[in-house]
């Protein structure tokens, strides 16, 4: 594995060409996107894709997101692009919106975990975008170990990898901290439901698709396959407190000890989203055992932040 620094704006062509050639050659490459870091391989190469699952320790029934750099590449993945998706693509691509399409037979089954649909996005980060233009379609889940918070900086990627796993990666592109810090919004244009909330909010989508809504999910019927796993979990236990502030403070005092830390989510939501995963990882390094977290309003980006916290939480207290 090589670790190479690359400029976020005007990424060096030589580095991009090297990484693109590696992908075309069936190798695995780690790169930044505007959401989180991705670990990518040629989406049309089954063996290359299987290495991603191996490195991440990802369950085989959790499908990947495919990154494209041109609309022509979309035609390698699907034959049917509906009118709603077309409008959304026009408005939000390149950007942190993933859309679901009927998949072509040419796409290996492991990319979609056997589903007949495929998740696709065109990333906005210049490094990811250029790399996808040169070597797309690129299948790339978040570059964390399965079950860990997604990486928003290269250090997070490296700390998750064993020495053996680094051997399976050709190159890691260090393009600095990611912009949004939360994974892309996943939207299904057929059901008009948000399967995974993210940086593009319901309000943004409703400007284009007025009937859009959040998917309702339950543990036995997840909105999207990946949503059934406990995601985003640091080692410390996350305890979420929702509702009446005074009661929450009282309960926190009652339950907390010297190994407890309070994660404050007040303030600018974009900043909270951007730094959330890094803060969870940092708390782990400090050796805390419990993370107490008071919920924020589930509105706009707040909804996406709370989605991740609910998934990270091992217990939730609600005070009406
Ligand atoms: O921002 C992102 O989307 C990042 C960067 C690297 O682009 N990628 C990412 O990938 O978050 P990953 O693998 O960590 O999450 C993929 C999500 C999972 O929740 C998975 O279930 C869902 O996308 N997904 C993939 N294919 C799907 C499909 N055909 N139908 C429904 N959901 C799908
Ligand atoms: Mg992930």
Image (cartoon, rainbow, N blue to C red):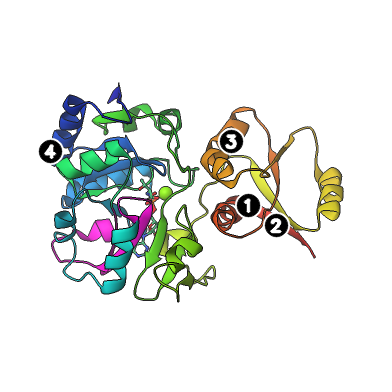
Residue at 35% x, 56% y: name it.
Answer: 92
Residue ID for mark 4: 25
Q: Which is nearer the eye, 286 or 38?
A: 38
192 to the left or right of 46: right
Q: Are marks 1 and 2 in contact (CB under 8 Å)?
A: yes
279 to the left or right of 295: left
Residue ID for mark 2: 316
Q: Are marks 3 and 4 in contact (CB under 8 Å)?
A: no
Residue ID for mark 3: 279
Q: Are marks 3 and 1 in contact (CB under 8 Å)?
A: no
Q: Residue 137 at x, y = what percent?
A: 19, 50
Which image quadrant for residue 253?
top right
Which comes before the other along the chain, label 3 or label 4? Answer: 4
Q: Residue 308 at x, y = what percent?
A: 55, 52
Give how far apart the Cα atoms at labels 1 and 2 are.
7 Å
Which comes before the other along the chain, label 4 or label 2? Answer: 4
Which structural element holds mark 2? strand
Which structural element holds mark 1? strand
Give how far apart the Cα atoms at labels 4 and 2 are.
46 Å
Mark 1 packing: few (<14 Cα in 10 Å), some, or many (20+)? many
Which comes before the other along the chain, label 1 or label 4? Answer: 4
Which image quadrant for residue 104?
bottom left
Give how far apart the Cα atoms at labels 3 and 1 are.
15 Å
Q: Which residues are magenta?
A: 92-121
The label nearer to you, 3 versus 2, is 3
269 to the left or right of 18: right
Which comes before the other along the chain, label 3 or label 2? Answer: 3
The label nearer to you, 3 versus 1, is 3
- Image quarter hosting the C terminus: bottom right
Q: Is residue 112 magenta?
A: yes
Residue ID for mark 1: 313
């Amino acid at each position: 594995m090589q670790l190479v620094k690359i400029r976020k704006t005007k990424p060096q062509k030589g580095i991009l060409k090297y990484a693109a050639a590696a992908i075309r050659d069936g190798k695995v490459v780690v790169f930044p996107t505007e959401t989180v870091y991705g670990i990518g391989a040629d989406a049309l190469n089954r063996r290359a894709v299987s290495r991603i699952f191996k490195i991440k320790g990802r369950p085989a029934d959790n499908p990947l997101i495919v990154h494209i750099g041109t609309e022509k590449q979309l035609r390698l993945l699907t034959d049917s692009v509906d009118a709603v998706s077309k409008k959304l693509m026009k408005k939000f691509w390149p950007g942190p919106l993933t859309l679901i399409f009927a998949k072509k037979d040419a796409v290996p089954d492991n990319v979609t975990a056997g589903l007949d649909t495929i998740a696709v996005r065109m990333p906005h980060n210049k490094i990811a975008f250029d790399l996808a233009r040169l070597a797309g379609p690129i299948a790339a889940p978040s570059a964390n170990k399965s079950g860990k918070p997604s990486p928003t900086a290269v250090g997070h990627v490296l700390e998750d990898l064993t020495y053996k796993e680094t051997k399976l990666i050709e190159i890691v592109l260090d393009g600095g901290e990611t912009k949004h810090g939360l994974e892309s919004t996943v939207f299904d244009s057929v059901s008009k439901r948000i399967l995974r909330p993210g940086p593009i909010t319901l309000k943004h989508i409703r400007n284009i698709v007025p009937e859009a809504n959040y998917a309702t999910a339950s543990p036995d019927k997840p909105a999207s396959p990946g949503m059934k796993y406990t995601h985003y979990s640091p080692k410390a236990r996350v305890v979420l407190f929702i509702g009446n502030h005074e009661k929450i403070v009282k309960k926190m005092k009652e339950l907390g000890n010297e190994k407890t830390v309070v994660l404050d989510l007040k303030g600018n939501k974009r900043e909270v989203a951007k730094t959330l995963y890094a803060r969870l990882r940092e708390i782990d390094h400090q050796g805390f055992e419990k993370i107490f977290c008071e919920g924020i309003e589930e509105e706009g980006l707040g909804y996406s932040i709370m989605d991740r916290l609910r998934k990270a939480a091992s217990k939730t207290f609600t005070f009406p």
